[in-house]
Image: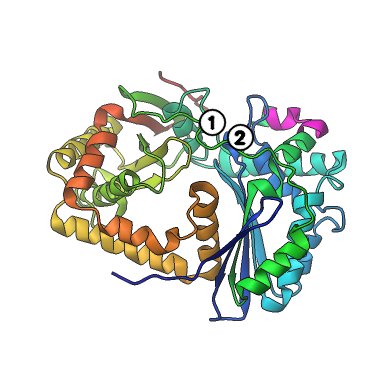
């Protein structure tokens, strides 16, 4: 087992901003990662999509920065940058030459604390149109584009924070007023609801001084998220399903399961189970359904780790032409039953562990991914040292722990099934309860 020991230094500013620094002199760059603890789970009914909309608005200028200047200023010195939104968070990140670190921190601080000066009706209307076009291109007009939306809506109750996707709905985006948007920022954006990580060619002392200089004067303005307020969801008591008829290339079946929250032993164990079942090139379902019986042209299985009371396990199967999707679903369920009864073999568990180790080490080798990972587990699980301990936790699990996790969370009777059936373009969608 590799000995992972990335240095971790922490400090919390008086205004609540949590700062984590991991010095790495390998190359003369620094990755800056800022996680704001706001995602689609924090939205209210009728105003979905605001967390993602702010990801866009944060690049449209702030009190001292012109629209688009955040990109141009950092790219002009050789930096790269972007942002993403998810259920549990919004993250902003850049990797810059170490000489540009102060510029990056000044830009982040200005939009983090002084954004609303630039959030005008014109900017809101412009970025609302950008997000709506993104929704059309990536979701509404793409094959299987709304499949995950359907999975979330099928497996999570209508009033659950994970029921709707981060993109939101066209109706809610259109209905959002300038006052709504300003209130959302004031509620969620502030140093006391954020985590800042710096990884690269900077000492902790240098980093803390620069962060204090640029972020220290910002007020603790956010209403801090109350962790633990979302109840734990047990596995489904019986199967539920949704069927779509759309002009997709082939029939596809999604089987989804409620899993435990990320970062615990049960989540790690059921993740290994999904790897053995369908997450590797040598997995059982891939070998049987794709290679041997040719009932499917492709298959994948993976966990989607979430922070609030539940996660999601997903098996996706592309059905071969002429094969009944119901048959494929039953074959997957039969394999789940066999796995629950017998668990993984020693060889399968070794292969899943080796792939987990390879993927983890490969990800952490990239400075920006390491910064994001540290920020992730600090913001959502209060564990900045997780990068150093994750593999120890996973590789300590034995076959019986993996089997038990599958028995608890991957029961066929606890599945939510979303099926996309290929249809002529003129056919309408059909929902089946």
Q: Say left or right for 70 vs 92.
A: right
Foreground residue among 205 and 165:
205
Q: Which residues are magenta?
A: 172-180
From mark 2 to mark 1, how far is it between C-alphas?
7 Å
At 72% from the left and 44% from the top, the residue drawn is 130
The number of discs equals 2
Foreground residue among 61 and 320:
61
The image position of residue 112, as x and y in percent, is 74, 52
Question: Can residue 71 be seen from the camera position used here?
Answer: no
What's the magenta bit mostly, secondary-structure-wise?
Answer: helix
At 52% from the left and 47% from the top, the residue drawn is 380
Indicate the quadrant containing the N terminus: top left, top right, bottom left or bottom right. bottom left
Foreground residue among 190 and 156:
190
Residue assigned mark 2: 42
Foreground residue among 395 and 317:
395
Task: For label 2, count other residues whose C-alpha is less than 10 Å away and answer few (under 14), some (14-19) or many (20+).
Answer: some
Residue projecting furthest to the top: 433
Residue assigned mark 1: 161
Q: Which mark is residue 399?
A: none
The image position of residue 162, as x and y in percent, is 51, 33
Asked if labels 1 and 2 touch by Cβ distance under 8 angstroms, the answer is yes
The image position of residue 71, as x and y in percent, is 75, 62
Q: Determine whether the residue tagged by mark 2 lies in a helix, strand or loop.
A: helix
């Amino acid at each position: 087992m590799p000995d992972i020991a990335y240095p971790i230094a922490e400090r919390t500013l008086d205004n609540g901003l949590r700062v984590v620094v991991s010095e790495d002199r390998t190359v003369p760059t620094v990755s800056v990662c800022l996680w704001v603890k706001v995602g689609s789970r924090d939205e209210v009914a009728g105003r979905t999509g605001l967390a993602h909309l702010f990801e866009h608005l944060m690049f449209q200028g702030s009190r001292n920065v012109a629209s688009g200047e955040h990109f141009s200023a950092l790219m002009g010195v050789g930096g790269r940058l972007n942002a993403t939104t998810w259920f549990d968070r919004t993250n902003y990140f850049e990797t810059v030459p170490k000489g540009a670190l102060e510029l990056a921190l000044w830009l982040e601080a200005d939009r983090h604390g002084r954004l609303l000066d630039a959030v005008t009706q014109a900017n809101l209307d412009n970025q609302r149109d950008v997000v709506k076009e993104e929704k059309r291109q990536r979701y509404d007009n793409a094959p299987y584009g709304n499949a995950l939306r359907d999975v979330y809506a099928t497996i999570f109750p209508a009033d659950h924070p994970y029921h709707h996707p981060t993109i939101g709905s066209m109706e809610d985006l259109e209905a959002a007023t300038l006052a709504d948007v300003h209130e959302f920022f004031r509620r969620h954006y502030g140093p006391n609801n954020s985590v800042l990580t710096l990884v690269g060619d900077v000492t902790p002392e240098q980093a803390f001084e620069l962060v204090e200089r640029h972020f220290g004067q910002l007020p603790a303005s956010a209403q801090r998220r109350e962790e633990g307020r979302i109840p734990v969801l047990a596995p489904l008591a019986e199967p539920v399903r949704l069927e779509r008829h759309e002009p997709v290339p082939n029939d596809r079946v999604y089987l989804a399961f409620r899993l435990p929250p990320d970062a615990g032993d049960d989540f790690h164990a059921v993740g290994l189970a999904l790897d053995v079942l369908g997450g590797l090139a040598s997995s059982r379902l891939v070998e049987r359904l794709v290679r041997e019986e040719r009932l499917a042209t492709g298959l994948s299985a993976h966990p989607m780790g979430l922070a609030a009371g539940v996660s999601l396990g997903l098996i996706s199967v592309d059905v071969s032409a002429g094969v009944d999707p119901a048959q494929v679903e039953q074959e997957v369920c039969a394999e789940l039953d066999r796995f629950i009864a017998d668990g993984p073999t020693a060889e399968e568990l070794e292969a899943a562990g080796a792939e987990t180790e390879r993927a983890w080490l490969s990800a952490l080798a990239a400075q920006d991914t390491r910064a994001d990972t540290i920020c992730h587990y600090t913001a959502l699980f209060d564990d900045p040292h997780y990068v150093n301990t994750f593999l120890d936790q996973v590789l300590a699990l034995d076959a019986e722990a993996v089997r038990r996790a599958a028995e608890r969370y991957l029961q066929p009777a606890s599945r939510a099934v979303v099926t996309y059936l290929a249809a002529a373009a003129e056919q309408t969608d059909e929902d089946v309860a």
